[in-house]
Amino acid sequence: MSTVNLTKPAATGSSVEGPRYVARAELVLAGPDHRPLGKAGLDPDPLEHLAAVCAQVRTEAGEEAELVVDLVPVPGRKVARRRRALMRRATRRGPSAYGEQLGGAGRGGGAMEILRDGLGVSPGGAKRTARVPRQSDLSEGVGKFTPGADAQVFAVQVLVRCVARHPQQAQARLHQMLAAMQAFSGENRFVPVGPKWGPWRRYSNTWWLRSRFDRRLERGDFAPARRQWVTWQEIAGLLKPPTARCDAPNVARCGGVVPPAPAALPTWTGQRDVFPLGRVTGPDGNERLAGAYAKDVLFGASYGKSGFGKTEKALVECLARAYAGDGAWFLDPHGAAWQRARPYLAHPAVAGRVWEINLARPAMDDRMACWNPLSMEGRDIEEVQDIVGSVVGAIASAHAWGEGATRARTLLSSAARTLAHLSHHLVASGHPELQPTVFQIKTLLEDEEWREKPYLNRSWNVRIERSSWSGDLPAVRA
């Protein structure tokens, strides 16, 4: 059994003399337990009203306010048994529409009509087919105990106890607690048990309920007035701690979940071996610009909303490593950050190593960077297989071939291997500028005249046997 207490703590060392009056109430579900409570959200926090009630309790005067929620898990077999009973009841009721029963159940034809419906016999004596309720009727009859719902079911016991120096004040405080519990109202809601005779509302303060209430509260006995089953989604608002949406002033704040910076972090003042991290506040309350040793930094990532300083932090880190003698690459799609960093890169220590590559407004005579995956410059013949695997994997991923396009992969591998060997021969012959690219794959596979021509001289010739390329060609596009 798990217990959740929401109380106003008593003042330490306080001794209050004089009479004190207690108001008690046990809360139960107003409707059938298969009807769900309202799922309280996080904005506003459902605990805000309860915290506001506790904020008005004067502990120095001996007042108290206590809300106890006891939960006991319900075995799955009991929930399944309850679900089957609800489904049988929904089947007996028959189909409905807009809250009204259809057919004989809606007309109220008396005992004979009910007997005929149960036997499946029409008034004329002919046997008729029993009515089958619609799926929506079954779902409404089962409620929150729908089969397959991912919801752990608990039996719940809710006890409220308020203490004050005046009986009316204790009763008023109790009513405030009951009003705060209305945040969980939906198709079902929590209501107090006890007699209600006109304006007289004693709840669990009556003589035949009082001793049982106090015994459960003091000893922790679990004995609710009747079956009270709830799912964890319905009761989660009472089990969680107060969130940032809870604005009650009497809620203790943890100060956030970000731990303080370690005291061993060095202070960055421009050292070459220190990587700047940001400003931290020490135990003495003083701020400093902390860093980490560059040898200990493997990688990092910054996430946050726009305008929260991610770009400024990246600029400082980039400039710090540039002045430390390391290489740095700052990618700025908008160009605004680069304009702010320019004055700091004009120093003679880094000005000679700065390269600005602007792809936004290229001139006609500008040279663009490119890469040929089939190039064999500086490579050995043993690396051909690695090049073939890279080219085939890239094209197969772009065309989403999957694992079933084995023939297409075979043809593409043969073509890439042929072009890679051709590139190696051209590099060895002193003509690296004639190396083929991936755009020659289509030419190699589809242009028979190109495949038959010798290249450079008659000493070598690259040919592909026609039998190797029989059948359909793969969908390889330039």
Image (spheres, grey):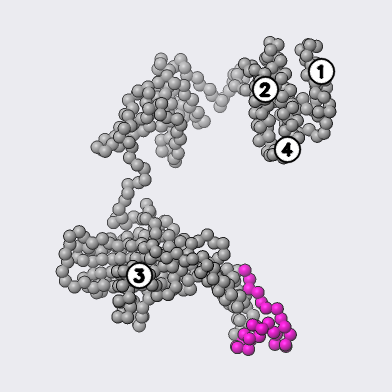
| Tag shown at residue 221 | 3
Mark earlier in primary sequence (2, 3): 3
Mark earlier in primary sequence (2, 1): 2
Mark earlier in primary sequence (2, 4): 2
| Image quadrant assignment for residue 265 | top left
The three-letter amino acid code for the residue at tag 4 is Ala
The three-letter amino acid code for the residue at tag 3 is Asp
| Cβ atoms at labels 2 and 3 below 8 Å apart | no
Name the residue rendered at 82%, 24% in the picture: 465
The three-letter amino acid code for the residue at tag 2 is Val
Report the Cα–Cα distance between label 2 and label 4: 22 Å
Mark earlier in primary sequence (4, 1): 4
Q: Which residue is mark 1?
A: 453
Q: Position of residue 312 (x, y in %)?
A: 41, 31
Q: Position of residue 135 (x, y in %)?
A: 62, 68
| Helix, strand or loop under label 2 | helix
Image position of 114 (left or right of 290): right
Residue 174 in view of the camera? no
Report the Cα–Cα distance between label 1 and label 3: 96 Å
- Density class for disc 4 (Cα within 10 Å; few <14, some 14-19, many ≥20) is few
Q: Which residue is mark 2?
A: 384
Mark earlier in primary sequence (3, 4): 3
Q: Which residue is mark 4?
A: 405
